[in-house]
C-alpha cells in the first residue's frame, strides 16, 4: 500500500498558535524533564504569543528504549 503524499509522520508545521491559530514550525526551546516528559516553548511569529506544551511518553518499565537484539 502506498501512502498518500498528504500523510506525514512529522508533527512539525501542524501545531497551531494557541492565540491566533497560525501554524508553528518548531519550538523555540525544548527541555528534557525526565524519561517520560519533554517541555517545549513556542513563540508565534504572527502575534508574538508565547506558550508551553508538555509531551508525555508512556513509562517504560524496563528502562530500555528498544528490545535487545543480542542473542
Image: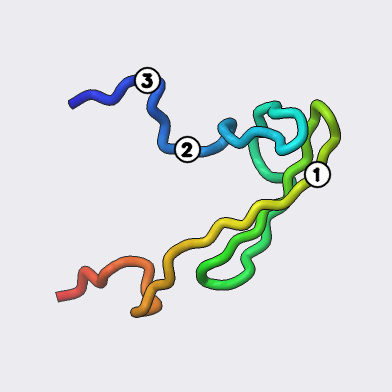
Instruction: Write down the residue under mark 1.
Output: 50
**Residue sitting nearer the eye, 57 or 25:** 57
Instruction: For the residues labelled 3 and 1, say whether their Cβ atoms are less than 8 Å apart.
Output: no
Q: Quadrant of residue 12?
A: top right
**Residue sitting nearer the eye, 57 or 5:** 57
Q: Which residue lies furthest to the top in this view?
A: 5
**In the rendered structure, which disc, 3 or 2, sits on the residue that comes first in sequence?**
3
Q: Which residue is drawn at 68% across and 44% down?
A: 27
Q: Quadrant of the C terminus?
A: bottom left
Q: Which mark is residue 37?
A: none
Q: Residue at x 72, y 52 (%)?
A: 52
Q: Residue at x 65, y 28 (%)?
A: 23
Instruction: Write down the residue under mark 2.
Output: 10
Residue 2, placed above or below residue 39: above
Q: In which quarter of the image is the N terminus?
A: top left
Q: Is residue 38 left or right of residue 18?
A: left
Q: What's the CA distance linking mark 3 and mark 2?
A: 13 Å
**In the rendered structure, which disc, 3 or 1, sits on the residue that comes first in sequence?**
3
Instruction: Write down the residue under mark 3.
Output: 5
Locate residue 69, reporting x and y percent. 21, 69
Label 2: which secondary element: loop
Locate residue 19, reporting x and y percent. 76, 35
Amino acid at each position: 500500500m502506498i501512502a498518500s503524499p498528504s500523510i506525514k509522520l512529522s508533527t512539525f508545521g501542524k501545531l497551531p498558535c494557541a492565540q491566533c491559530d497560525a501554524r508553528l514550525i518548531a519550538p523555540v526551546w525544548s527541555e528534557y524533564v525526565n524519561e517520560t516528559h519533554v517541555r517545549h516553548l513556542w513563540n508565534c511569529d504572527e502575534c508574538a504569543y508565547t506558550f508551553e506544551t508538555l509531551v508525555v511518553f508512556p513509562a517504560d518499565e524496563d528502562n530500555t528504549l528498544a528490545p535487545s537484539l543480542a542473542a
